[in-house]
Amino acid sequence: MGGGLRPDDRVLMLKIGSAVEQAAGDPDQLYELARSWWKASPAQVQTTRLVVGVADNAIVSAWAPTAWTVSVEPGTAGRVAFRGDAAPEAAHLVGASVAHLYPKGAANPVRYTTVAALTGVTPSTVPSVVHPTGEASATAPTCVLLRLRRTWHDDMTPEELYDATRGYWAMSLSKAETITRAFAVARGIVREVYEPVSWVPSPEPGEEHRIGFEGVVASDRDRWIGRDVSSVFPQGSQNPVRYVTLVDLDGPDPTGRPAATGTESPPAGRGTEPDFVERVEPLLDALEGDLLWSMSRAAQELFHSNTLSWLLSEHPDAAASLAAVFDPAGAGALEVWREYRHIDLVARRGQGAGRFVVENKLYSIPYPEQLTRYAEVDLPWSAGHGSCGATDTSYFLLTLMDPTFDLPSPWRRLSYEQVLTALDAIDVEELGRDADLVTRYRALVRRLVQLKGAVDPRENPDEPFSVRAALAGLGHKGFVGPLQRMRFTGLAQMTTEEYGTPVPLHVDITRAMGLITYERRLSATRSIGWQLQEGQLRLFVLVRDAELAGPGPDRAAARARVAEAEYADFVDFDPAEQVLGDLLLPKHFPTGHWQRFAPDFVYRYRKVDELVTTRQLAEALAELTAYVDAWRLR
C-alpha cells in the first residue's frame, strides 16, 4: 500500500496480546503469529486497508494487507488470514490508545473502525491512498440511515437529536462495526450526520438485538444536511434501519467528479435492511439462556396466565397498572380465579364490580367459533347467559400474535405489548423480595414482544419470505414452530391489507411448517379455497359428503373424481402467476389426478421459488382470494 490513508478507509483491529508475549520483541515472529486465523467475514476483510494489532488497549503493530486467505481446514474452516507488509503509518500509530473504540465488556477480538476514528485526523490532513493500479480507491464506506419517527420534532436541540439517533436499533454488531457514518433521518430528510466511534448494546433487558453508538458529528455533515433520502427506503417498509454506501446515496459518476451536494434525491431502491438472522438471533440466544423461558415452555399460556394472576392477587397495589389494563376505572382488591372451567383467568372486584375474563393465547388464535363457546361458559357471578357473555363483564383475548379476523362479540383483543407497558409501570421497589423475579419476567415478556416484531415480515416486505431459508442460518431448533407461526401471521395480515377488507385467514402449523388457508364455503358439503405451506401454493376443494369423507384409498379416489368432475376448471393459478411470474414454478396436472389429505381435502399445487418476497406473496394471495370469492359453479 503506497501513499497515505483516507479518513474513510477501513481498519481491522485484532487483539493479539498472547502473540505479543510469544513473539518476545521479534517483529517477524509477531507477524506470523498474528496474521491467522480470525473469525471474520471474508467479504468484509477484502475492503480493509490497514490491520492493527492491539494489546492492553494500545496499538502494538500495524500492517498493510496485500492478500487474504480463507481456511478450509477442520477447526479453522471459514476463518481468515492476511499477508502484508509493515504499514508506513506504523511509526505514528504504535503506542496510541484505542480504549475509546472498545465498548465496556467487549469480548470479540476482531473489530472494525476507520482511519478517522482511529487517529482523530480530518480529511484535510490525510492524503488519499493510491493503490497499485495507480487509481484512487473507489471503495465506498458503509453508512446507515436511521429513521426517527415519534422522537422527532422541529425544535430538537443538537443534544436531543444525538440522543434520539444514537440508539437503540435492531441491527448486527458485526455490521455496525463497518459503519463510518450514521444519518439521522426524519420525514425523509437528513437532519444530522455522525461518525460512530464505538457501538454498545442496549442496556434494557429483553432488547439484546438492539445496539447504539457513541460518536461525533461528521466533518462532512454539510454535504448531506437537508438531503431528501426518502426514496432509499422501499415503499411500505416499516424497518427504520437501512444500510447504504455513499455511492447508493449519490449514484456513481463516470467522470470521477465528487458526488453531488445539496438536496438532490438519491436513486431509489438502494441499500439493504437488517436481515432475518441479525434481527432475531440475539433474542433467541437470550431466551435460550433465560431460566424463566425454560420454565415456561411446558405450558406457555398457563405460565403467563398464572404469573399475571399472581401479580394481581399478591401485589394488588404495586400491580395497579396491570389491573387497570383490564379494569381502568376499578379500585380495591381483586378476587381472581385461575383456569376456571378452562378459562385462563377470571376476576372481579368485590360483588358486581370490575368483572373480566381473559383467554390467553401466545402463538395461536382461537377460531371465532371457539371464542363464542368460551363466552357461553358459566362464571361465578353469571350462569346461562349464552354466547353474548355475562352482563357487565369484559372479555379479553390476550395474544402475542395479531388476529387475522374480526373478533366476535363480546371479545376484544388485548396485546402483550399493552401488558408490557403495564409491567413497565410497576415500581419493582414496592415488590420486596419478589422484585428480581418480576424484573426478570418483564424482560421475558419484552423479548417475546421484540421477537414478534423482528420476525414480522411486514418489517422487511421486500426480503424473501421463505421461513425455511431464513431459519437455515439459525441454530435454535426449538423455536421453529413459534417462528413459523409468527411469520405466517404477519403474511396473513399483509394479505388482508393488500385485499383491502378483513379476510378470515387461518394460520396454523403442521409437520413443523407454517400454514395459511383461505376457505370459501359453497354448501354444507363443499368448500373451495387456497392454501400456502412453505413452498407449495395450493388450490383446494373440500368434499364433506358423509360417504366420501375419511381415510382410505377408495374414498380418496372418490373425492378426486368429484373434484375432477365439478371443479377441474377451478384450478387456475393465473391470478397468482400474473404477480409472481417465473417465481411460480410450472406444473402439469394429469387428467383426474389430485393430491389429497384425509378426511376431505383435495388439491393441486404449484411450487413457489424461495426468492419470492413477502410483498409479492401478499399481492398474489390477495389476487387468489378475489378469484376464489368470484368463482361460481357452472
Image: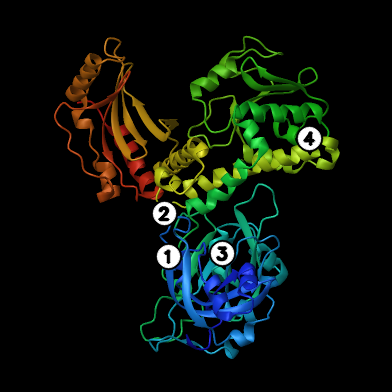
- Identify the mark at residue 70; answer none if there is no mark: 1
Taking 485 as reference, is 59 above or below it? Answer: below
- Amino acid marked by disc 2: Asp
**Residue 475 shown left or right of residue 149 in the figure:** left
- The residue nearer to you, when weighing 110 against 515, is 110
Determine the image quadrant of residue 570. Answer: top left
Badge 4 or badge 1: first in the primary sequence? 1
Q: Nearer the viewer, mark 1 or mark 3?
A: 1
Q: Quadrant of the C terminus?
A: top left
Kindly state the secondary structure of the residue where label 4 is placed. Answer: loop
The residues bearing labels 3 and 4 have C-alpha atoms spaced at a distance of 39 Å
- The residue nearer to you, when weighing 477 against 601, is 477
- Graded by Cα atoms within 10 Å as few (under 14), some (14 to 19) or many (20 or more), the crowding at tag 4 reads many
Q: Percent x, y for residue 8?
A: 54, 79
Badge 2 or badge 3: first in the primary sequence? 3
Q: Is residue 231 visible?
A: no
Taking 524 as reference, is 504 above or below it? Answer: below
Q: Percent x, y for residue 449?
A: 60, 42
- Amino acid marked by disc 4: Ala
The residues bearing labels 2 and 1 have C-alpha atoms spaced at a distance of 32 Å
